[in-house]
Image (cartoon, rainbow, N blue to C red):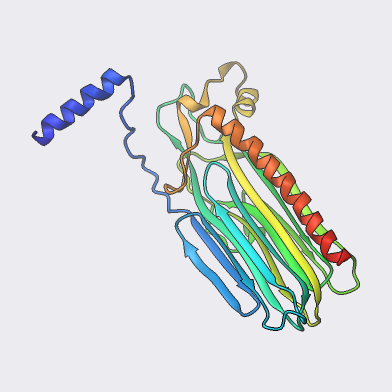
């Protein structure tokens, strides 16, 4: 069959199925999202680098003399989807002198509000709701844990330089400070984004242990972020002139992220993310408590 006939046949099939043809490519070119990960269990170097795909990794180190040290473990993940989530953990019981263990996970991505039809009134800004959440916690021996989320109109490497949204968390411990230190945040906010402008996002969490003394330690954390059009905020601003934003604009993200699921699946995913975060906090506190009791 000739290419023109194939195109006609495909168009007739799409029309018969009641499925709209694919939208033409927008004018905004967004770069791929990147998983930036780094993991190490004492002398066992795990994966490190940037990857245009979701990533999971783990490592363990079993000392040759089991009576003098326990096993060191570290894990990480960077999950793509409507909800972007990073998570890490490290732990060891009766570790040797001056261990060095780390686990970090970062997702860098791009985002834009794209106009695909002419609205009844010009849009200079579009309200977008951001939901960002994170938590880190450490036991008392020489750990530094941190993370956060930002969105910026310029490419940034420092969270506090972001000009649209930024929130960070940090906790660190040294011997004798206390049994458990933690930091967390859960923020839902509305951002006024300019249509057709590229924004740069980042969500990160990491644990780094470099103690000068042997002992027991644990660290764990996660961070996540998601975005949706804020119709309620738009209605409040426009009053009687309001209209359905989704008919004229959409939130586009890095092309290698999974497309947004249907509303029912999105609701289930959101509930799952909340449950995962709560389970992560319980796991962290249980792990630290077990180590301290050992």
The residue positioned farthest toward the left in the image shown: 2
Q: Left or right? Give the position of 29 relative to 158.
A: left
Q: How many marks?
A: 0
User: Can you see residue 128?
Assistant: no
Quarter occupied by the N terminus: top left
User: Can you see residue 11?
Assistant: yes
122 vs 97: above or below: above
Which picture quadrant has residue 27? top left
Percent x, y of residue 114: 44, 37
Who is closer to the viewer here, 202 or 90? 90
Q: Which residue is located at x 71 percent, y 62 percent?
A: 146
116 vs 55: above or below: above
Q: Which residue is located at x 48 percent, y 28 percent?
A: 122
Percent x, y of residue 281: 76, 50
The residue positioned farthest toward the top in the image shown: 240
Who is closer to the viewer here, 85 or 74? 74
Quarter occupied by the C terminus: bottom right
Q: Left or right? Give the position of 98 relative to 22.
A: right
Who is closer to the viewer here, 146 or 141? 141
Which picture quadrant has residue 115? top left
Percent x, y of residue 121: 49, 24
Percent x, y of residue 161: 63, 59
105 vs 102: above or below: above
Who is closer to the viewer here, 4 or 121? 4
27 vs 284: above or below: above
Q: Left or right? Give the position of 171 relative to 227.
A: right
């Amino acid at each position: 069959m000739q290419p023109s006939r194939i195109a006609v046949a495909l168009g007739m099939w799409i029309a018969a199925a009641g499925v709209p043809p694919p939208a033409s490519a927008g004018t905004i070119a967004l770069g791929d999202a990147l998983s930036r990960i780094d993991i190490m269990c004492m002398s066992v170097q795990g994966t490190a680098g940037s990857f245009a795909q979701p990533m999971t990794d783990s490592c363990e180190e079993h000392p040759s003399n089991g009576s003098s040290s326990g096993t060191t473990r570290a894990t990480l993940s960077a999950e793509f989807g409507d909800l972007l989530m990073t998570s890490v953990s490290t732990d060891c019981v009766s570790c040797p002198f001056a261990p060095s263990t780390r686990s970090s996970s970062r997702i860098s991505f791009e985002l834009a509000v794209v106009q695909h039809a002419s609205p009844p009134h010009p849009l200079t800004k579009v309200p977008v709701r951001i939901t960002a959440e994170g938590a880190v916690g450490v036991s008392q021996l020489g750990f530094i844990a941190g993370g956060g989320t930002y969105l910026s109109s310029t490419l940034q490497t420092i969270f506090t330089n972001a000009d649209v949204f930024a929130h960070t968390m940090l906790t660190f411990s040294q011997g004798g400070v206390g049994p458990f230190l933690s930091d967390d945040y859960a923020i839902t906010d509305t951002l006024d984004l300019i249509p057709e402008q590229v924004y740069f996002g980042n969500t990160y969490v990491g644990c780094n242990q470099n103690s000068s003394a042997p002992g027991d330690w644990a660290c764990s954390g996660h961070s996540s972020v998601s975005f949706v059009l804020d119709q309620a905020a738009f209605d409040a601003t426009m009053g009687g002139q309001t209209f359905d934003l989704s008919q004229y604009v959409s939130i586009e993200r890095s092309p290698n992220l999974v497309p947004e699921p249907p509303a029912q699946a999105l609701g289930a995913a959101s509930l799952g993310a909340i449950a995962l975060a709560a389970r992560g906090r319980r796991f962290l506190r249980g792990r630290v408590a077990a180590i301290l009791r050992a």
